[in-house]
């Protein structure tokens, strides 16, 4: 009787471990998918057609991410006479797993720098 109970307990632990592993794998897959989407949205900011668009949100990325222009980056005192070249954007991507990043884009040079990123929780 003790042997039967021990086997039943081990089977329960094994089933729980299998479920835990499946949930973990699904989470990793969703996180990687959201990361790829975020990177695609960030790279999309460098496209000239997207920058010249007068729409508030990026058309091609509206279904995948939210891009919010936060405004120009303040220039240093020595370059005050030059026009603004760098702009700050906040990007959110994902459904179940959501990631937000803040980037600085120099549209004239075609460069982008990620300042930070974080996973969003409800």
Image (spheres, rainbow, N blue to C red):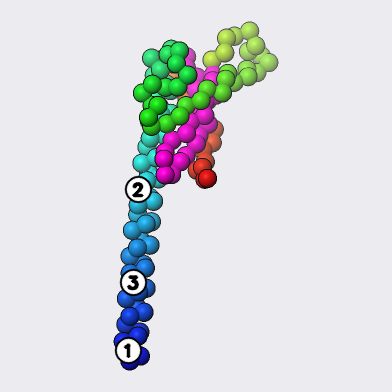
- Nearer-the-camera pick, 87 or 93: 93
Main SS, magenta residues: strand
Name the residue rendered at 50%, 22% in the picture.
105
Residue behind mark 2: 29
Q: Residues within 10 Å of mark 1 (few under 14, many from 20)?
A: few
Residue at which label 1 appears: 3
Q: Pointer 2: residues within 10 angstroms few (<14), some, or many (20+)?
A: few
Give the magenta-colored segment's residue range.
86-109
Identify which residue is drawn at 35% across, 52% down: 26
* Helix, strand or loop under label 2: helix
Q: 10 Å neighbourhood of mark 3: few (<14), some, or many (≥20)?
A: few
Q: Secondary structure at mark 1?
A: helix
- Quarter the N terminus occupies: bottom left
Which numbered dot is residue 14? 3
Q: Residue furthest bottom?
A: 1
Q: CA distance from mark 3 to mark 2?
A: 23 Å
**Cα distance, mark 2 to mark 1?**
39 Å
Count of marks placed on residues: 3
Q: Position of residue 35 (x, y in %)?
A: 40, 39
Q: Quadrant of residue 40?
A: top left
Secondary structure at numbered mark 3: helix
């Amino acid at each position: 009787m003790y042997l039967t109970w021990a086997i039943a307990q081990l089977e329960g632990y094994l089933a729980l471990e299998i479920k835990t592993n499946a949930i973990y794998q699904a989470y990793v897959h969703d996180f990687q998918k959201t990361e790829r989407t975020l990177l695609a949205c960030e790279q999309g900011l460098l496209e000239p057609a997207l920058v010249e668009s007068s729409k508030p949100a990026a058309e091609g990325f509206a279904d995948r991410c939210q891009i919010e222009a936060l405004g120009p980056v303040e220039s240093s005192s020595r370059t005050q006479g030059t026009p603004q070249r760098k702009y700050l954007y906040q990007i959110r991507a994902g459904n179940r797993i959501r990631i937000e990043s803040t980037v600085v884009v120099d549209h004239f040079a075609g460069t982008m720098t990620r300042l930070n990123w974080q996973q969003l929780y409800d």
